[in-house]
Image (tube, rainbow, N blue to C red):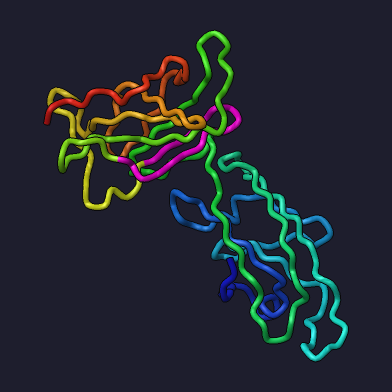
Amino acid sequence: MTASLALLSPDIVKRRVMVALELVDPITGRLAGADMRVSGPGFAAPSVTRAGQIVWTDPQPPLDPADPAPPPDRQLAIEAIARHGQFAPYSRTLTLPVRLKDVPPPVYRDTLVPTGLYQAPPGRLAAAGMLIDAAASRQPVAGAKVRIWLQSRNDAAALDSNYQAISDTRGGFVAVVGDLAGDASMPQKAPAPDGAVIGWIAFTVGATTRHSLLLPLRRARLFQAPAPFVWAALAAAPPALPAP
């Protein structure tokens, strides 16, 4: 993806920008450049703008479009590691043509993948835990798709949380509830704690989806699973939902 670039850096830097990379936190939507350690062998270390863009300046002067012999394209191999492990490692190789006078630099945008070390934003209904294959072996299940499901307040049916997490190499995950498009989660009836809602987690590995039991989820809070979820012990069907 390319787009016009709006840098919040001094003009002398703006005129020398070779390329900018935007790495997006999919849960908050913010640019997470300041959270990443980024390298591109063969080029000077990039800087991070106040907006969160990762920017490489160009060691070469801009090319006059009338130049009959432009230099060859350059390869920028990007490696990025989250400073606190909250995102999965990121890598991408960009092919960059020579920079031309009066032509805006390209901007590339990618979405990061949160790991089990991600800190869910305050005020979000979320669930964190680990997925293992079996109680005996306790091998982590990486790459599982993880979704919170809720009971709809509108029609009492199953309601997709509209966000999919991915379990990391340790089997860890943090799933959040996204935009419910005008719906809401069904509250639990008394004597349940204030803010308690009806929901569970669905795990998908390959083409197979399995489900947890109903969990003690609460609005605007993080549920931290006290023990790993065991793939072999999960149910093939969603849990039965209570009558409204």
Most distant residue in the top direction: 136
| Quarter-of-image position of residue 123 | top left
Q: Residue at x 62, y 73 (%)?
A: 9
- Closer to us: 213 or 86: 213
Q: Residue at x 50, y 51 (%)?
A: 25
Most distant residue in the front direction: 207
- Closer to us: 231 or 110: 231
Q: Is residue 165 magenta?
A: yes
Compared to 41, does 154 lie above or below? above
Q: Quick check: 135 left or right of 223?
A: right
Q: Residue at x 22, y 44 (%)?
A: 184
Q: Residue at x 22, y 34 (%)?
A: 195
Q: Quick check: 178 left or right of 72?
A: left
Compared to 135, does 210 lie above or below? below
Image quarter (top left, top right, bottom left or bottom right) of the C terminus: top left
Compared to 93, does 89 lie above or below? above
| Quarter-of-image position of residue 48 | bottom right
Magenta residues (range):
160-176
Residue 169 image offset from top left, x and y in percent: 60, 30
Q: Is residue 37 magenta?
A: no
